[in-house]
Image (cartoon, rainbow, N blue to C red):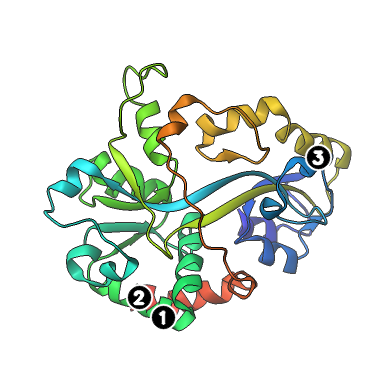
Amino acid sequence: MLNRLILTKQAPVADVVYGLDNSMLPKAKAEGLLEPYLSPAQAQVPPEYRLSEEGLLNTVDYGLVALNYDRAAWAKTNLPLPKSLDDFRKPEYASQLVVPSPATSSPGLGFLLATVNHYGEDGAMQWWKEAKKGGLKVVKGWTEAYYTEFTRAGGRFPAVLSYGSSPAAEVYYAEGYDPAKLPAEAPTANLFLPGSTYVQLEGAGILKGASNGAAARAFIDWLLSPEVQRDIPTQMWVYPAVPGTELDPVFKLAETVQAAPVKAEVTENPQRLIDRWVEEVQRQ
């Protein structure tokens, strides 16, 4: 989506863009894609979750990019659960994990940024190289990772990069889901290992050159309205940006964690990190 916006910025294909996140904002800003509009509703969003105080992107939702595992399938590996990302340097662990590519997937990019934040740039690239050599599988996008390669979908990998809310989604979409009778646990769970979790902030902004600015502003305001914010969690499996929004009871099974804040220097030029990752990890 970001690449398409860049290629068409002289003749924008839309008035509004929704779905650019904190890992993509620096490139969108550098390319001059967005014009400022700060929705009045952004005042309700906590400061730490606001993407842009000048209104280039208005935060609509957020999610925790996190490692998930299939409880039943992992038990069959006879491996203890990993205690740190360093465990995935070992082939016996690396060969259990599938992740979407940082070059073609926003959760994949978030995971790359989390590892750079944790290990430093050189250390992160080394981690990726060792994990890939040990059997880590990298696929194009989240859908392929979760719905093709993950054991819950019949694949062979019992661990996957997904979201902190994915265990709740597994229960919600199960046959016979009853919010009044939640199970004790979901069939999947999160691995909130230090350095593996990334807070992904998604926003909406007006494209520079938009032909209908008034409607674009109204649409962004609507995305932050109570009715849309209430609908976001079980439609998109992320959290509404406006605090106090009511959640479906199934979100009791969506564990949360305080992820380490990503240093500003890590996010200032994600494309450079992607390019290095492609050269040193993907092409090797």
Answer with the quarter of the image where residue 34 lies: bottom right
Q: Specify whether 31 is left or right of 151.
A: right
Whole-number angstrom distance, CA of label 3 to CA of label 1: 43 Å
Label 3, residues with CA under 10 Å away: few <14, some 14-19, many ≥20:
many
**Residue 57: x, y in percent?**
74, 52
> Tag on residue 216?
3
Among numbered discs 3 and 1, the one appearing first in the sequence: 1
Secondary structure under tag 1 reads helix
Q: Quadrant of the C terminus?
A: bottom left
Is any atom of residue 181 visible in this view?
A: yes
Q: Specify whether 174 is left or right of 203.
A: left
**Residue 243: x, y in percent?**
66, 37
Secondary structure under tag 3 reads helix
Secondary structure under tag 2 reads helix
Q: Specify whether 252 is left or right of 139.
A: right
**Residue 192: x, y in percent?**
39, 55
Q: Amino acid at mark 2?
A: Trp
Label 1, residues with CA under 10 Å away: few <14, some 14-19, many ≥20:
some
**Residue 231: x, y in percent?**
59, 27
Q: Amino acid at mark 1?
A: Gly
Q: Nearer the viewer, mark 2 or mark 3?
A: 2
Whole-number angstrom distance, CA of label 2 to CA of label 3: 43 Å
Residue located at (86% from left, 40% from top): 212
Q: Which residue in the protein does label 1 denote? A: 123
Give the answer, above or below, for where 50 lies relative to 123.
above
Residue located at (45% from left, 58% from top): 197
Q: Nearer the viewer, residue 250 or 141?
A: 250
Marks 2/1 in contact by CB < 8 Å: the verdict is yes
> Tag on residue 127?
2
Q: Amino acid at mark 3?
A: Ala
Whole-number angstrom distance, CA of label 2 to CA of label 1: 6 Å
